[in-house]
Image (cartoon, rainbow, N blue to C red):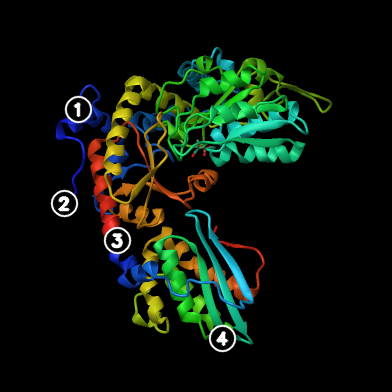
Amino acid sequence: MTTIPGSAAQRREIGHAPFDVWRIREDFPILKQKVHGKPLVYLDNAATTQKPQVVIDTLVRYYETINANVHRGIHALSEQATQEYEGARETVRRFLNAADAREIIFVRGTTEAINLVAQSYGRTFLTAGDEIVISAMEHHSNIVPWQMLCEQIGARLRVIPFDHRGELSLEEYEKLLTERTKFVSVVHVSNALGTINPVRQIVDLAHRRGIPVLVDGAQAVSHMAVDVQELGCDFYAFSSHKLCGPTGVGVLYGKAELLTRMPPYQGGGDMISVVTFEKTHYNTLPYKFEAGTPHIAGVIGLGAAITYVQSIGLDRIAAYERDLLAYATAALDAIPGLQIIGTARDKAAVLSFVLDCAHPHDIGTILDREGVAIRAGHHCAMPVMQRFGVPATARASFAFYNTPEEVDVLVRAIYKAIEVFA
Amino acid sequence: MSDLRDLYQEVILDHNRRPRNFRKVEGANRTAEGHNPLCGDQLTLYLRVEGEVIRDIGFHGSGCAISKASASLMTDSVKGKTIAEAEALFEKVHAMLTTEHKAQADLDGLGKLAVLSGVWEFPARVKCASLAWHTLHAALQGAEQPVSTE
Ligand SMILES: Cc1ncc(COP(=O)(O)O)c(C=O)c1O
């Protein structure tokens, strides 16, 4: 028999009023599924989140009733599609509290947003000998685009270290900022460790030296309210699919003043105003950065996803997940031979762990047979694994629709893995 | 539905706990590195080949139970075999790991390696079980590049 820490009363309090997680779960059709004959316990939300019915319905409604290209037609459908597409841009603007909707650029995802900035801003305003500062807990998508830029122009990458808990050292960060530093790009919430970084301070320290900052918000936007003006960052990137929206869409927020000075990233339709064979005049913001037919359905679906999470409230989501994380942390901590990787004091609901008797990949397979979906591997953050001296971790990452009861299932499944390998 | 015990058989758990030939080989004249980026499995193979015969073989590395047990079983089963015999075994193992086998005849000649016959039902784990064999193949071919299952 497995004992699970936390009283029944405590669990009830997490699971019910004022946050009715059971009501919320009804919005997600996939959560009713069985996997290997067991109820699905989906704890791989850092990889991608599930989609509520309203988002699925929005995609269907778009294709059934208003499908048309945007910004091009004079007919009714095109006007309606354009209206909804631009409406989603305004929804994103309000979501991030950007000053102006022209600062919201639709891209394919976080990865493309970072590549856009590295290439458009980086190749224009950085040169040989300049330095770019990132952190040691970046996702590969916030490492490789900068390495590519460094190779292209002869710039250098500098890395902010983190401590045994997985907290960045601001002291070391300050030391890295010199007259050579021309750009800072850091992750808001680490996908491998869950650490919430002090982005506001990171931005302030860079801005004091006139250095622009990009924040990778892929893991942040679904867990907390984000206000880009309050953070002060120059660029902010996130992916729709980690925020209950469709795949294939993401957002780059950039300050208008910077975006205006940056050249286009790709050429094609929509991003021009006048084309002759002698010269092309680029379109204004944000279209300058949206070459070609965008993922119209995806953008409108993202708008619906944002409206949905806002109807629950990001502050309520953050509070609920904080309780759920505390509950799950205590439950996993009590398992003999289990070590949690990433114990920052300010953490999102991500639990990376290793067992002394079983490899993460074996844990993943055994949990899967219990219906529990987690991720095992390096989480696209190989330097983080190297820092902790592990080849991989198992990672349970939570969303606001997960319950304490699901944590209990996870714990029982981990005991099952221990039973096989002990 | 496949059972977990089809995958984690006692023999596999034993080879995971106490891998055989888990050592560097003195006088090795063939080595190869294997890497499975997805799960972080990493393996170095050492072989001493005399003429056409694999006289000694050992490995080092870290990985999941399936990859470790598979490497352990592989080294046991190819030691003393000729290169041609080892390559033929590689083909048979590959077929066992990737296709459904209904008849016992499919597993004939595989000996102890047949304990890995449940792996094909776990597609995410086929790479773990085949890593050691791909690495062996590379070592026998004298490939210079580290092998990757990606
Ligand atoms: C922190 C972080 N940054 C960037 C990404 C890349 O996002 P996408 O693959 O949606 O472009 C991810 C996704 O795993 C992530 O977790």
Q: Which of labels 2 and 1 is toward the front?
A: 2
Label 2 element class = loop
Q: Nearer the viewer, residue A419 or A270?
A: A419
Q: Using the image, determine if residue B148 lies above or below residue A330.
A: below
Point 62% across, 41% down: residue: A144
Crowd tier of the residue under label 4, counting other residues whose Cα lies within 10 Å: few below 14, some 14–19, many 20 or above: some
* Chain hosting mark 4: B
Q: Give a yes or no on whether discs 2 and 1 share a subunit.
A: yes
Type of the residue with mark 3: Ala
Q: CA distance from mark 3 to mark 1?
A: 35 Å
Instruction: Identify residue for label 3.
Output: A422
Which label was assigned to residue A13? 1
Label 1 element class = helix
Of the image marks 2 and 1, the number of the one nearer the N terminus: 2
Q: Which of labels 2 and 4 is toward the front?
A: 2
Residue A166 visible here: yes
Instruction: Identify residue for label 2.
Output: A1
Type of the residue with mark 2: Met
